[in-house]
Image (cartoon, rainbow, N blue to C red):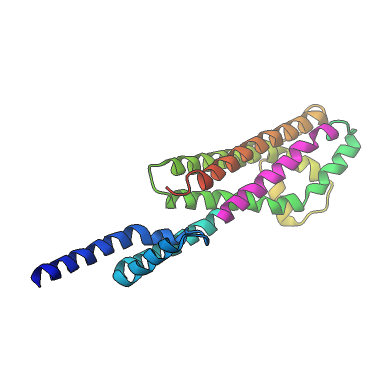
């Protein structure tokens, strides 16, 4: 009897061990999983209560992480889309005369200015995601790369794009907060207006490239290394 009791206790401990190992997989188990797998999980559910609780906590954490990853991808994608839209306009805008070009430039306010908040949100989201990602590992480095690219993209705006923005909206009626915003880091016009145009357009090509690299990096982290 003592031998049987010892064997039962050992089997129970073994079940708990397998519960800890296998039950969290229920989070990602497809609906078409085999009946044998489901029966095995059900048996483990009866065998190890604490392991099951830990498994459910693991499942909940995975779902929250995935939801946050989706939000991050969306913010980075919006940032890339806005910059890419500017870059794709370049061939056509280079054909515009001065008066027409200046008129076209005013249409970006306030829509693209509002969309710029996604850029800040993307940087914050990537920073949080990086903090929550285990180190070291491929997913950590790809997430870090996405953050570095997006921060560089944002830096190009403040160092190159924004200083010439005030020139395009100087004849547009804007609110006082907007006027203060556009006056920050303003660049004085020197030479022909095409100089400012070339700086503005080139900055958006650079921003589009950096934003695309950021999106690719976080997409790689979210797909190829999601299980790390």
Residue 3 drawn at (x, y percent): 10, 67
Kindly identify the residue that appears in the image at 71 percent across and 47 percent down.
182
Residue 34 drawn at (x, y percent): 46, 60
Q: Is residue 103 left or right of residue 87?
A: right
Q: Assign the N terminus to one quadrant of the image.
A: bottom left
**Residue 8 appears in which quarter of the rendering?**
bottom left
Q: Quick check: 9 above or below 163?
A: below
Residue 104 drawn at (x, y percent): 85, 43
Kindly identify the residue that appears in the image at 67 percent across and 38 percent down.
208
Extreme-top residue of the structure: 191
Extreme-left residue of the structure: 2
Q: Quick check: 19 above or below 102?
A: below
Q: Residue 84 magenta-drawn?
A: yes
Q: Which residues are magenta?
A: 70-92
Kindly identify the residue that appears in the image at 54 percent across and 42 percent down.
220
Nearest the eye: 50 or 75: 50
Q: Quick check: 155 above or below 33?
A: above
Residue 15 drawn at (x, y percent): 27, 64
Q: Residue 23 magenta-drawn?
A: no
Q: Is residue 174 left or right of residue 143?
A: right
Q: Is residue 105 left or right of residue 56?
A: right
Kindly identify the residue that appears in the image at 44 percent across and 40 percent down.
138
Q: Is residue 200 left or right of residue 6?
A: right
Q: How many marks?
A: 0
Nearest the eye: 16 or 218: 16
- The prevailing secondary structure element of the residues shown in magenta is helix
Tell me, yes or no, if residue 203 can be seen here: yes
Nearest the eye: 189 or 100: 100
């Amino acid at each position: 009897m003592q031998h049987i009791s010892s064997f039962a206790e050992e089997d129970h401990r073994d079940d708990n061990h397998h519960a800890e190992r296998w039950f969290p997989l229920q989070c990602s188990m497809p609906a078409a999983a085999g009946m044998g797998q489901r029966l095995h999980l059900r048996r483990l559910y009866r065998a190890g209560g604490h392991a099951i609780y830990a498994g459910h906590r693991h499942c909940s954490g995975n779902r929250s992480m995935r939801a946050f990853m989706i939000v991050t991808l969306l913010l980075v994608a919006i940032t890339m889309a806005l910059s890419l839209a500017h870059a794709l306009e370049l061939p056509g805008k280079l054909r515009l005369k001065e008066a027409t070009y200046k008129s076209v430039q005013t249409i970006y306010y306030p829509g693209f200015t509002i969309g710029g908040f996604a850029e800040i949100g993307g940087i914050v989201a990537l920073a949080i995601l990086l903090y929550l990602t285990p180190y070291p590992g491929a997913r950590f480095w790809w997430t870090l790369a996405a953050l570095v690219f997006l921060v560089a993209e944002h830096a190009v705006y403040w160092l190159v794009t924004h200083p010439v923005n005030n020139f395009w909206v100087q004849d547009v009626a804007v609110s006082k907060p907007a006027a203060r915003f556009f006056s920050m880091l303003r660049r004085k016009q020197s030479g022909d207006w095409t100089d400012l145009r070339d700086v503005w357009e080139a900055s958006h090509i650079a921003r589009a490239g950096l934003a695309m690299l950021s999106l690719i990096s976080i997409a790689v982290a979210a797909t190829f290394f999601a299980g790390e």
